[in-house]
Image (tube, rainbow, N blue to C red):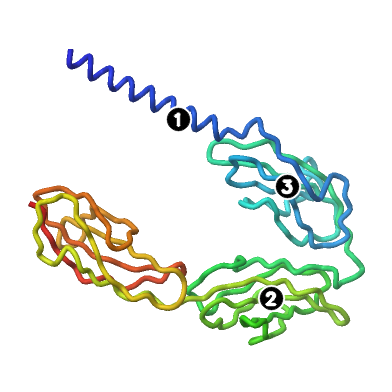
Amino acid sequence: MKKLFAYTIVLFIFLLTLYSCEEVLFEEDLTDKTILLIAPTDSTTVRNTSVTFNWEGVELATAYRLQVAQPTFENASQVVLDTTVTTTTFSTNLLRNEYQWRVRAQNSGSSTLYATASFIVIESEDFSSNEVILVAPENNAITNSTTPALQWQVVTDATRYRVELLDENNQVIEEETTTATTTSFTFPQGATKWQVRAENNTQSTLYTTRTLTVDNIKPNKPVATAPANDATQSSTTVTFSWTRETVSGTTEFDSIYVYKDVALTELVVKDQLTSPSDVSLDASTTYYWILKAFDQAANESDPSDVSRFTIN
């Protein structure tokens, strides 16, 4: 009777899990969905080498696969672009030629069919109408490097590029010209705008601008306050608390690490928590724990002193 009951429970759990998985797969299935292109539409002539692709988002999609072929995918001399993005727009510079582009929506389990359109790029006689496409760092990126590499795409007929750093009042604090499509500056702490324009002997494009936040100051070391070192308790719910002074910069957070050995190799808990926080642990065990602080720029504090406690 006990065996029959146990078998029934296992079968019920299996069927419930199978049903749940089928529900998840059904909800995320993109096979029958359609993706709609916005621009460039089919047979369009783009009178600029700076091309922006736009399409409508698809519900439940987590990414989009974008490809551009020259002149068509069926008779491609080359695929000039093949990328996966999470937005519904993408910009790039293309030479004068015939192209075909396509995009599909996808997630971890399925994808739509590609939607495809052809277009022609004609270089504008007005050099100033071109756009500098910035490549890296991404807009509003956060980094702990004070000398990040700045990159952008080539602009046809450009003889040089002017690069500027701007402070919070949009005043130029650094400037240089270069014939390359990459350079670096020493950025100050905090948020700084950087912008690039293309120039030739007579004209220049508008600036393309992004913001970059630099933070290379590591957070302060957390100080454990409870449970006290060598404390003993009977409850298996342990309340951890600590203090730490914040430093100016990006958002900071704390992580706790609980081990079963003094060498700190047998990890049983690793979690991002705020003080105080309750954690359930096993009885009849001695634990060792430390804390570390991190920030959005991937700076890491020194670890706190190791503390030990025992649950009877």
Pointer 1 or 2: first along the chain: 1
Residue at (88, 81) in percent of width and height: 202
Pointer 3 or 2: first along the chain: 3
**Can you tell which mark lies on residue 55?**
3
Most distant residue in the right direction: 125
Which element type, helix, strand or loop, lies under badge 1?
helix
Q: Tell me the quarter of the picture where residue 277 sits.
A: bottom left
Residue at (73, 47) in percent of width and height: 55
Measured as percent of width and height from the top left, residue 273 is found at: 33, 59
3D distance between C-alphas at marks 1 and 2: 48 Å
Most distant residue in the top direction: 1
Quadrant into which the N terminus falls: top left
- The residue carrying mark 1 is 21
Measured as percent of width and height from the top left, residue 121 is found at: 86, 56
3D distance between C-alphas at marks 3 and 1: 30 Å
Is 81 displayed left or right of 40 in the figure?
left
Q: Amino acid at mark 2?
A: Gln
Q: Is residue 207 above or below residue 174?
A: above
Is 260 displayed left or right of 217 in the figure?
left
